Amino acid sequence: MEFQCDTTSRVPIYRQLMEQVRQGVARGRLRAGTRLPSVRQLSRELVVNPNTVARTYTELEREGTLITRQGLGVFVAEPSADLSAAARRERFVESLDRFLTEAVHLGFSADDVLSGVAKRIKSFQFAGAES
């Protein structure tokens, strides 16, 4: 997977990279066990400070998306069931609420939102879905 950063964006570079990794996992482009570029390598490729890449990897490791294996590198972690079903549902509902709030503020109707989700959902990889 190729990473990119937009230095003109208001979104911090480490957040841009975090989102790219999350989307890569969600879309099946980055599978569990996939080795990511080293901090030094990715910072050179993107021409960003190594601390920015290190922060990205640290945050993603903290949330369970990545895992560091000493001497081997940074890898995409296996999906974890650390959160209870209730906690996962609560996080999901919070995310939905943010998404729907944004859709309302952008002037979309409920039908527009449902149609848009139906079109986009096919490009994501869900638990239990065959590859």
Image (spheres, grey):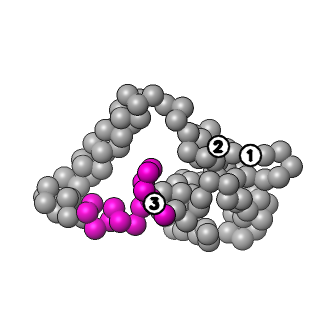
- Can you tell which of label 1 and label 3 is closer to the viewer? 3
Residue type, label 3: Glu
Q: Is residue 19 in sight in this rendering?
A: no
Mark number for residue 130? 3
Whether 86 is among the magenta residues is no
Mark 3 or mark 2, earlier in chain: 2
Label 1 CA crowd tier, 10 Å (few <14, some 14–19, many 20+): some
The Cα atoms of the two marked residues, 1 and 3, are separated by 27 Å
Residue type, label 2: Glu
Whether 126 is among the magenta residues is yes
Mark 1 or mark 3, earlier in chain: 1
Mark 2 or mark 1, earlier in chain: 2
Where residue 25 appears, as percent x and y from the top left, is 53, 57
Looking at the rendered structure, the number of numbered marks drawn on it comes to 3
Q: Please tell me which residue is depicted at 35% across the width and 32% down the height of the picture.
A: 90
Q: Is the Cβ of the residue at disc 2 closer than 8 Å to that at disc 1?
A: yes
Where residue 84 appears, as percent x and y from the top left, is 45, 28
**In the image, residue 131 above or below residue 91:** below
Where residue 68 appears, as percent x and y from the top left, is 74, 46
Q: Is the Cβ of the residue at disc 1 closer than 8 Å to that at disc 3?
A: no
Residue 42 in which image quadrant: bottom right
The Cα atoms of the two marked residues, 2 and 1, are separated by 8 Å
Where residue 82 appears, as percent x and y from the top left, is 54, 32
Q: Is residue 71 left or right of residue 42?
A: right
The Cα atoms of the two marked residues, 3 and 2, are separated by 26 Å
Mark number for residue 68? 1
**In the image, residue 131 above or below residue 99:** below
Q: Please tell me which residue is depicted at 20% across the width and 58% down the height of the picture.
A: 114
Secondary-structure class at tag 3 = loop
Give, as a single range, the part of the protein colored magenta: 117-131
Mark number for residue 61? 2
Q: Nearer the viewer, residue 129 or 53?
A: 129
